[in-house]
């Protein structure tokens, strides 16, 4: 007999683990199927942003993670002569999301926290060293055939399945989706080192050395970790560029074997692509299975975490019968344009790094007195959707991310609201009106009033993922906004 779950997640990387935590917090029975026996212990992703940290806050790991990461001061694009071409500074104080704008991390630290959180949840079962060899969607449920390390199989049943199974996604093949190529494909060598002694001269900024002969990226990671990413030229084999002698030759401009130990080296093909189809029936994809980006904005993992935050509350409402399954149609409609905007910007920055289309990237920045350009962080809205018919009208701010004010008692808003909708009002509700969401009043919380002033509205309805569902200006609009039934998934 098949073991029964509400949602089965294929893949236990950051996207899958974050999604599992959010779903478990909503009270769902979750299965996670992972091919590997244990967590990968070496660094991969090295950056995430304030919005992503806010999702980790919802998952319950942000405070512990904050002790293990490093605030990133920003990124600088340098010419072969050492001149600053484009500056992308990141504020060093807490930003609108209630967290810093940019962090550097050691990915195993994050995964350890996410997994430890799930280990404490009785409604989550992890099937390690297992792979899914069959998926069958009956229209009412999905049956998964799971094969263990010794070849034995077991059958699981889930209301929905989410493939967070990477760039070579089995799940994407099952739903029959191709990938739209956005025009970038290059081989890069990634080298991680552990410093033996302090080297403050290497700097804390991420540096992009825009050399048409051999573009190189330098990253400052937490503790004594440092990373270089180096373009691999045509004709160079993986074995050639990853030999210790060649690695130290690449790094000799900055460090020697007396300064550091090599931790890891690997050649990756950086691509830009978005899946044509993110869902078929009760099966869907997220993370690298749905989109691939060059690393030049540090947004690869962030995009997957945004997928998880967008999808978890919708799945919870559908499983609990609080929303129609048509709500899931909004997932790709909202996430794909948002992810593509980040990918296209990363591709433009790649043009600057490779000195192939420098002007296209420099157009992203504003001219400074020194002659260089200064870039601001982009914040693309979600793609347009009516949440499967839940919303009947468009508002000017719908689909934009709302900040996280500090409330009167000193707590961050999300710590009070949780992973749930919230209605923020300026003065109160019309008499006899009872919304489905929690209500916070600007009368009681000064920063909420400032946020409403910034939008020039009197009320805002936020979804669990903290994007705006709708706004109201005046009592007539407010009554319509209150009538929107976005139930709590908790």
Image (cartoon, rainbow, N blue to C red):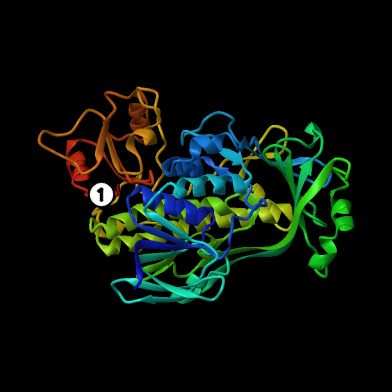
Whether residue 7 is situated above or below residue 197 in the rendered picture: below
Instruction: Please tell me which residue lies in front, 436 or 352.
Output: 436
In the image, taking residue 55 as reference, residue 49 lies left or right, namely: right
Q: Which residue is drawn at 44% across and 54% down?
A: 19
Task: Examine the image and state in which quarter residue 72 appears.
Answer: top right
Task: Examine the image and state in which quarter residue 323 appears.
Answer: bottom left
- Residue 333 visible in the displayed image: no
Give residue 295's position: percent from left, percent from top.
64, 54
Residue farthest to the left, as pictured: 432
Q: Quadrant of the N terminus?
A: bottom left
Give residue 57's position: percent from left, percent from top.
45, 40
Q: How many marks?
A: 1
Graded by Cα atoms within 10 Å as few (under 14), some (14 to 19) or many (20 or more), the crowding at tag 1 reads: many
Whether residue 32 is situated above or below residue 157 in the rendered picture: above
Q: Residue at x 50, y 46 (%)?
A: 116
Give residue 215's position: percent from left, percent from top.
77, 54
Whether residue 169 is situated above or below residue 353 in the rendered picture: below
Q: Residue at x 70, y 52 (%)?
A: 352
In the image, taking residue 421 as reference, residue 53 lies left or right, namely: right
In the image, taking residue 219 as reference, residue 465 lies left or right, namely: left
Look at the numbered disc 1 and give the secondary structure of its residue: loop
In the image, taking residue 237 as reference, residue 422 lies left or right, namely: left
Give residue 93's position: percent from left, percent from top.
55, 28
- Residue 142 visible in the displayed image: yes
Whether residue 156 is situated above or below residue 420 in the rendered picture: below
Q: Name the residue under label 1.
A: 486
């Amino acid at each position: 007999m098949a073991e029964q779950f509400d949602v089965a997640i294929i893949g236990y990387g950051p996207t899958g683990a974050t999604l599992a935590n959010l779903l478990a917090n909503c009270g769902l029975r979750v299965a996670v199927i992972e091919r590997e026996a244990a967590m990968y212990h070496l660094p991969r992703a090295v950056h995430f942003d304030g919005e992503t940290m806010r999702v980790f806050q919802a998952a319950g790991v942000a405070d512990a993670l904050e002790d293990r990461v490093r605030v990133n001061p920003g990124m600088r694009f340098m010419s072969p002569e050492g001149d600053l071409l484009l500056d992308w500074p990141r504020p060093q104080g807490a930003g609108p999301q209630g967290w810093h704008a940019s962090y550097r991390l050691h990915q195993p630290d994050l995964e350890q926290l996410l997994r430890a959180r799930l280990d404490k949840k009785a409604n989550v079962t992890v099937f390690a060293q297992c792979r899914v060899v069959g998926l069958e969607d009956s229209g009412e449920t999905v049956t998964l055939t799971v094969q263990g390390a010794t070849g034995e199989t077991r059958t699981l049943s889930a209301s929905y399945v989410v493939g967070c199974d990477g760039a070579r996604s089995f799940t994407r093949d099952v739903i029959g989706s191709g990938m739209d190529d956005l025009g970038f494909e290059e081989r890069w060598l990634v080298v991680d080192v552990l410093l033996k002694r302090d080297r403050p001269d290497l700097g804390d900024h991420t540096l992009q050395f825009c050399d048409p002969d051999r573009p190189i990226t330098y990253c400052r990671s937490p503790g004594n970790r440092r990373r270089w990413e180096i373009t691999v030229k045509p004709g160079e084999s993986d074995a050639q560029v990853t030999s210790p002698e060649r690695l130290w030759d690449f790094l000799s401009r900055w460090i020697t074997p007396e300064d550091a130990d090599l931790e890891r080296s690997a050649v990756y093909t950086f691509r830009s692509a978005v899946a044509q189809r993110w869902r078929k029936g009760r099966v869907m994809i997220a993370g690298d299975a749905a989109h691939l980006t060059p690393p030049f904005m540090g947004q690869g993992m962030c995009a997957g975490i945004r997928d998880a935050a967008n999808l978890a509350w919708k799945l919870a409402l559908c499983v609990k019968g609080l929303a129609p399954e048509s709500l899931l149609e909004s997932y790709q409609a909202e996430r794909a344009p948002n992810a593509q905007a980040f990918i296209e910007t990363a591709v433009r920055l790649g043009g600057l790094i490779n000195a192939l289309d420098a002007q296209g990237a420099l157009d992203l920045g504003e001219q400074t007195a020194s002659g260089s350009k200064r870039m601001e962080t982009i914040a693309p809205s979600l793609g347009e959707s009516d949440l499967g018919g839940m919303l009947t009208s468009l508002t000017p701010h719908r689909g934009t991310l709302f900040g996280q004010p500090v409330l009167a008692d000193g707590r961050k808003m999300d710590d009070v609201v949780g992973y749930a909708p919230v209605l923020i009002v300026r003065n109160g509700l019309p008499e006899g009106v009872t919304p489905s969401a929690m209500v916070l009043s600007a009368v009681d919380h000064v920063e909420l009033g400032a946020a409403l002033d910034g939008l020039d509205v009197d009320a805002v309805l936020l979804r669990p993922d903290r994007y705006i569902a709708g706004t109201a200006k005046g009592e007539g609009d407010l009554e319509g906004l209150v009538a929107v039934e976005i139930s709590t998934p908790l």
